[in-house]
Each structure stands twice: as C-alpha cells, then as structure tokens.
Image (spheres, rainbow, N blue to C red):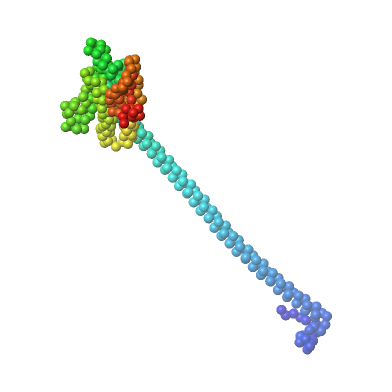
C-alpha cells in the first residue's frame, strides 16, 4: 500500500537497494515490513487450519461411512444368524414330525403284527403237542417203560421174552401186548407219511417191509423189526413236522409278513427240538442198541458152560451165553475177546 515516508532515502550502490537515510523513516519501514510478514503468517495459519478442518470433516465422513458399513455387516450377520436359527428350528420340527410319524407307523405296524401273530398262532398249534398220533405213541411207550425197564429186552423179561409170551398164553399180564400196540401205531405213522410222498406206495408192500412182532418169533427177530421201524418213524416224523409247517407257512404267505414267518419258523425249530430230545431220543435209547453200548449181565443159572453161545440181536449187538450168564456185547468187544477173527 502507499504510505508516506518522511525519511530521506539514499541509494546504496554497493548493495543495490534504496535505504532510509534517517531514523524515522527506518522505523516506519520496519513496522510495515513486520506487518506484512505477520499478515502472511496469519494467512498461512488460516489456510492450514482450513485444510485441517476440511481433512477432519472428510475423516468424519469416512468414519461415518465405515461405521455404517460395519453396522450393515453386523445387521446382515445377525439377520443371517436369525434365519439360520429359524431354519434349524423348522428342520428340527420337521424331523420331530417325521420321527413321530415313523413312530406312529411302527407302533401301528407292531400292533397289526401282534394281532396277526396272535391270530396266526391260534391257527397254528404245536405239532408235537397237538398231534393225536404222536400223543398216542408217547402214552403207549410210557406204559411200556413203566412196566419194562430201560430197554426192549428188559421189557421182555427173562429169556428174551419167552416168559412173557408164556404168561400171555394163559391170560397173564403180557408186556408184548403193549409192544404190539405201539408197533402198529408206529407202522401206521410211517405208512401215512410214505403214501403222502409216494402215492404208488401200498399197504401190502409196507407190511412186507415192516413185519409186526409175533409171540411165536424169537424176540431177537422182533427186536430187529422194532429197530428198523423206530429209525424210520423218527425220520418220517421229522419230515411230517417240516411238511406241517411248510403247509402252514404257505397259507400265510399272502400276508407277506416276515414277522409271522419268523414266528412259524421259531415254532418249527422248537417242535423239532422237542421231538428229537424227547420221544425220538427215548425210543432210540429203548429200542436201538449202539455198537459201543456196554452189555448187561443177567445171572439166570449157576450151571457152568465151557463154550459161549452167541445169538445176534440187532445190528452190531449180540447176546452171549457163557458160564450160566447172559449178557450183551458189541462186535468190537467180541472181536477183542477172540470170538471173531
């Protein structure tokens, strides 16, 4: 700006500047110069403050934007988490409903199976417990055992049944009557099963194979007939049990219910086991002599005998008379004694 400078000025050629020539002019000049410098400093500070304020505003805007983004992300996360919770709850509810439905269906199926099983089992009595033929054979055999010991020859008494036969001729009690009755039942049972499987099989042919025991035959011969009949009776009875359950299972096959089939099969196995371990085993022990079964000595006389008298009984078993005693022996025992070479 223009100002009055009352001070005299001079030109300094060495410095190339115009300087004040007196005291008053120099002070005024310095004052104006200092003012100029202070003004420039104030402007610079104001510009810097304005720039800082602008930067602060921008930072606030940026922070607000960042905070908004973070808030949006947090809201999105919470929303997604809530949606997942809802989906999980719905899935659990759906799973629970499905499980409840399955449980109800299974309970219904179980009730139906139980009802069908009860009806089926009412229509399926145990073969071994309900078959009249098998019961009759068991009853007759029980009578024989009660009166006749533990084997066929025990039942026949002395001399291989001769004494029983003799008593029977004069009206005495005769275990042979019970034996004959049992044989007829067993023979008829075998015949019925063979005819079922082979219609060409006839009674005449059957009676030739299974000859009835006779009081006029040696009991050793009768024993062989019994052994053959008992063996075949056991085999045919097992076949009858299986055929019975096969037929019953065929009747319920249209139900297509594995539960009932399993019950029928279980009862089949129980009946087979009852028969094998019951009546079949008892008949075998009584009528069928094994090769290694030890003989039993019966002392009927004190009269000595030098040579043994050997009579075949059933396959692999012999009746030996020696030194007034009778006993049974197997082929292996007699061979060891030197009777057979």
| Residue 32: image location, x then y, percent | 75, 77
- Residue at 52 percent of width and 50 percent of height: 78
Residue 327 sits above or below residue 257 on the image: above
| Residue 168: image location, x then y, percent | 24, 13
Viewer-nearest residue: 158 or 167 = 158
Residue 151 sits above or below residue 114 on the image: above
Viewer-nearest residue: 321 or 223 = 321
Quadrant in which residue 182 is drawn: top left
Looking at this view, name the residue that lies furthest to the front: 306
- Residue at 60 percent of width and 61 percent of height: 60
Question: Which image quadrant: the C terminus?
Answer: top left
Viewer-nearest residue: 64 or 173 = 173
Looking at this view, name the residue that lies furthest to the bottom: 13
Question: Which image quadrant: the N terminus?
Answer: bottom right
- Residue at 33 percent of width and 31 percent of height: 269
Residue 3 sits above or below residue 163 on the image: below
- Residue at 23 percent of width and 27 percent of height: 190
| Residue 189: image location, x then y, percent | 23, 26
Quadrant in which residue 252 is drawn: top left
The answer to whether 76 appears left or right of 131 in the picture is right
Viewer-nearest residue: 44 or 84 = 84
Looking at this view, name the residue that lies furthest to the right: 23
| Residue 192: image location, x then y, percent | 21, 27
Q: Is residue 176 visible?
A: yes
Quadrant in which residue 181 is drawn: top left
């Amino acid at each position: 700006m223009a100002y009055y400078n009352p001070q005299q000025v001079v030109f300094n050629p060495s410095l190339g500047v115009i300087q004040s020539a007196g005291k008053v002019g120099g002070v005024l000049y310095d004052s104006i110069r200092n003012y100029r410098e202070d003004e420039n400093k104030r402007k610079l500070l104001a510009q810097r403050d304005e720039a800082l304020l602008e930067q602060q505003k921008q930072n606030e805007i940026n922070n607000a934007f960042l905070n908004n983004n973070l808030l949006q992300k947090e809201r999105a996360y919470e929303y997604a988490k809530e949606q997942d919770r809802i989906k999980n709850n719905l899935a659990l509810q759906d799973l629970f409903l499905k499980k409840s439905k399955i449980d109800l269906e299974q309970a219904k199926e179980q009730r139906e199976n139980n009802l069908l099983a009860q009806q089926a089992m009412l229509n399926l009595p145990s073969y071994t417990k309900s078959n009249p033929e098998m019961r009759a054979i068991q009853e007759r055999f029980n009578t024989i055992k009660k009166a006749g010991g533990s084997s066929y020859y025990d039942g026949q008494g002395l001399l291989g049944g001769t004494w029983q036969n003799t008593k029977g001729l004069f009206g005495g009690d005769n275990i042979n009557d019970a034996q004959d009755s049992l044989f007829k039942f067993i023979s008829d049972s075998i015949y019925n099963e063979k005819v079922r499987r082979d219609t060409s099989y006839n009674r005449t042919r059957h009676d030739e194979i299974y000859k009835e025991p006779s009081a006029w035959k040696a009991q050793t011969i009768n024993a062989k007939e019994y052994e053959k009949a008992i063996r075949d009776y056991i085999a045919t009875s097992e076949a009858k049990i299986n055929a019975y359950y096969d037929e019953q299972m065929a009747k319920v096959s249209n139900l297509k219910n594995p539960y009932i089939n399993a019950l029928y099969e279980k009862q089949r196995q129980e009946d087979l086991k009852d028969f094998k371990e019951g009546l079949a085993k008892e008949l075998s022990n009584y009528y069928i002599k094994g090769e290694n079964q030890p003989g039993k000595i019966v002392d009927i006389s004190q009269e000595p005998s030098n040579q043994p008298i050997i009579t075949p009984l059933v396959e692999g078993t012999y009746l030996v008379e020696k030194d007034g005693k009778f006993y049974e022996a197997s082929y292996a025992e007699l061979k060891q004694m030197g009777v057979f070479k």
